[in-house]
Image (tube, helix red, strand yellow):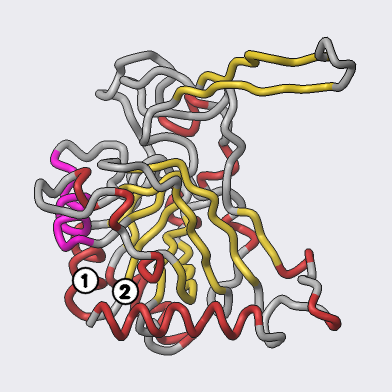
Amino acid sequence: MWTKLRALALAMVAVAIGGRTGWAAGGAIDPAKIVDLTYTFDARTIYWPTEPPFAHQFEHFGTTPGGWFYSSAKIAAPEHGGTHMDAPIHFNRGGMTAERVPLAAMVGPAAVIDFSARAAKDPDATLSVDDIRQWEAAHGRIPDGAIVVARSGWGRFWPDKKRYLGTDRHDDVADLRFPGFSPEAATFLLKRRSVIAIAIDTASMDPGDSKDFAVHRIWLGADRPGFENLANADQLPAAGATLVCAPMKIGQGTGAPTRIFAILP
């Protein structure tokens, strides 16, 4: 099955760069057809309450003895925070590490399922099977090789950690409050549809009040990657966009910072 999914995903990219999706005449890409779904990594980046913040430090910045300008810096960051990939090994002892996740598992048509109206009233809301079925009633069956994006509307709170996570206290995991996927929806997508990855515009595929991380265990347990903290999800159409996820290729990584963007139809 993975061979077929890989071929489909790569075919989607070929369509995108072949002039039918997102590219202007003459071969130049149309900037209006690209949506950046990645938050900047800096001191404001939101990480899990148990993690240290992103660190960036210039080692050189200025004029050299030879008279030209030169700068370089070093960074330090947890794997899981900001816009990032959860590699399967994050919750699956035998799962793929970050560098082993195939590119074809990270490129595909985006099925953007919106449950923001419910999430606005309930921070513990989860994407349900009914939400999936309603999307399919409007847009057709989720295409094989798709990446399903759960759109909760939570991006409006970034980078306010307290509103985005439910708490801004270090080590406080008891008061996390934000939407996620339901275990039933994750199981449906895994068993009933040929979906290569799931993504969400919150800090976790599981809702903040989860204590057993059932969605992580279901999805990553099936050796599928997941993507969290998507930016600008409100700019995506429900269907028709192509999603490209490019995580840092960390050897033995349990996850990785990821540049994610969409090519609009």
The residue lying furthest to the right in this view is 67
Dot 2 and dot 1 residues touching (CB under 8 Å): yes
Q: Quadrant of the N terminus?
A: bottom left
Q: Between 133 and 226, which is closer to the camera in this rendering?
A: 226
Q: Is residue 226 left or right of residue 33?
A: left
User: For mark 1, does the 10 Å Cα neighbourhood hold few (<14), some (14 to 19), or many (20 or more) residues?
Assistant: some
Indicate the quadrant where residue 23 lies: bottom right
User: For mark 2, does the 10 Å Cα neighbourhood hold few (<14), some (14 to 19), or many (20 or more) residues?
Assistant: many
In this view, 34 is above or below 97: below
The residue indicated by pointer 2 is: 195
The residue lying furthest to the front in this view is 66
Q: Is residue 69 left or right of residue 240?
A: right
The residue indicated by pointer 1 is: 190
Q: Is residue 46 left or right of residue 56?
A: left
- Please tell me which residue is depicted at 36% across the width and 62% down the height of the picture: 198
**Amino acid at circle 2:** Val
Secondary element at tag 1: helix
Q: Which residues are magenta?
A: 212-223
- Please tell me which residue is depicted at 62% across the width and 79% down the height of the picture: 16
Q: Between 133 and 14, which is closer to the camera in this rendering?
A: 14
